[in-house]
Image: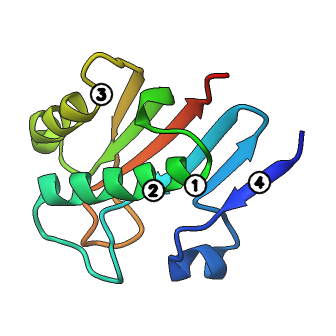
Amino acid sequence: MTRKLISSGSPFEEVAGYSRAVVDGNWVFVAGTSGFSNGQIADDVVEQTEQAFSTVAGALEQAGASLVDTVRIVVYLIRAADFEAVAKVCGKHFKGIKPANTTIVAAALVDPRMKVEIEITALKRA
């Protein structure tokens, strides 16, 4: 199997030398994804989470997969108080899918405007 690299077009991907997603066989590994879109980010954690899901879904689509194929999600939050709001967004997108989930409260993310970042691992079904 060949490895496929997927870009979302974010300038950070070029600067830091990473891919939004990497496909290796039937596995799809989506990098930590924040709520940035076209260099802009909302202040609201729910809006950031929805944008992150949109970016992740686009990367999965380019990989020939979708959110239904998600087997694991890691959520990084800055504030534990945001857990319930972010969990509701995750629950909306993963209703019936129920991937393994790890949620971590971190001291900071790379940009002080970022309140949430998600990382997805998916397994494409044959």
Q: Is residue 40 left or right of residue 123?
A: left
Mark 1, residue position: 62
Q: Label 1: few (<14), some or many (≥20) within 10 Å?
A: some
Mark 4, residue position: 4
Mark 2, residue position: 58
Residue type, numbered disc 3: Phe
Label 3 with label 2: CB-CB less than 8 Å? no
Marks 1 and 2, how far apart in space? 6 Å
Residue type, numbered disc 1: Gln
- Residue at x-position 40% and y-position 59%: 55
Marks 4 and 3, how far apart in space? 25 Å
| Residue 68 position by quadrant | top left
Q: Nearer the viewer, residue 124 or 88?
A: 124
Marks 4 and 2, how far apart in space? 15 Å
Element assignment for label 4: strand
Residue type, numbered disc 4: Lys
